[in-house]
Image (tube, grey):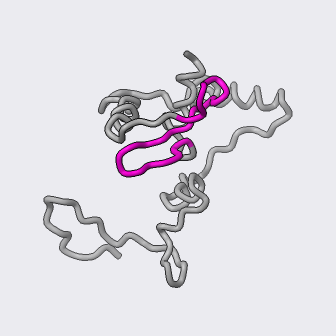
Amino acid sequence: MLKYAGRYIRRGPLSERRIRAYDGRRVTVAYTHPAQHARPTFTLDAQDFILRLLSHIPAKGTHCARVYGLYHSACRDQLNQARARLGQPPYQPEAEPPDTHELLHRMFPDFTGDLCPKCHARLVTMTVARPGRSPPGRQAA
């Protein structure tokens, strides 16, 4: 159970690499440990796939532990003691959290959806239009 729950601490329930095919109606997914199964993949109807995937999303308002143990911010001293025993430098958190573009490129190195297809400069969001709301009075700078 601990391994099963631990997988969700750093990432979601299914990596994109495991989705092998989609024909518009059915999704083929690779097993995490294919050696333990008769076939390396399984196929589901798209609706069943989405229902299974959504069953792993916690209900709104549910508190999810994303860090625990030595990695929790309240245990920074203990983490640094452990790192010192292993000959590692003290943990230094990032001064500024990365912006959305940087996160996208860390998670998906081949992602180019935020670059101009012509000059390859980074695209900047000027305004966001929400459905059902009137547009903003002026453009953001």
Q: Is residue 91 above or below residue 134?
A: above
Specify whether residue 37 is painted magenta. Answer: yes
User: 65 or 18, which is in the foreground?
Assistant: 18
Residue appearing at x 50%, y 38% in the figure: 14
Q: Quadrant of the C terminus?
A: bottom left
Q: Quadrant of the N terminus?
A: top right
For this orientation, the residue located farthest to the top is 1
For this orientation, the residue located farthest to the right is 87
Residue appearing at x 43%, y 28% in the figure: 64
User: 31 or 108, which is in the foreground?
Assistant: 31
Number of disc labels: 0
Specify whether residue 25 is painted magenta. Answer: yes
Question: Where does residue 44 sit, x and y in percent of width and height?
Answer: 41, 36
Q: Is residue 21 above or below residue 80?
A: below
Question: Where does residue 8 sit, x and y in percent of width and height?
Answer: 52, 31
Q: Is residue 57 above or below residue 2?
A: below
Question: Where does residue 138 sit, x and y in percent of width and height?
Answer: 23, 76
Q: Is residue 23 above or below residue 3?
A: below
Question: Where does residue 106 sit, x and y in percent of width and height?
Answer: 60, 55
Relative placement, left or right, of 135 versus 25 is: left
For this orientation, the residue located farthest to the front is 38
Relative placement, left or right, of 128 versus 22 is: left
Residue appearing at x 64%, y 26% in the figure: 70
Q: Quadrant of residue 110?
A: bottom right
Q: Quadrant of residue 26?
A: top left
User: 4 or 61, which is in the foreground?
Assistant: 4
Magenta stretch in the rendered image: 18-41
Residue appearing at x 64%, y 23% in the figure: 36
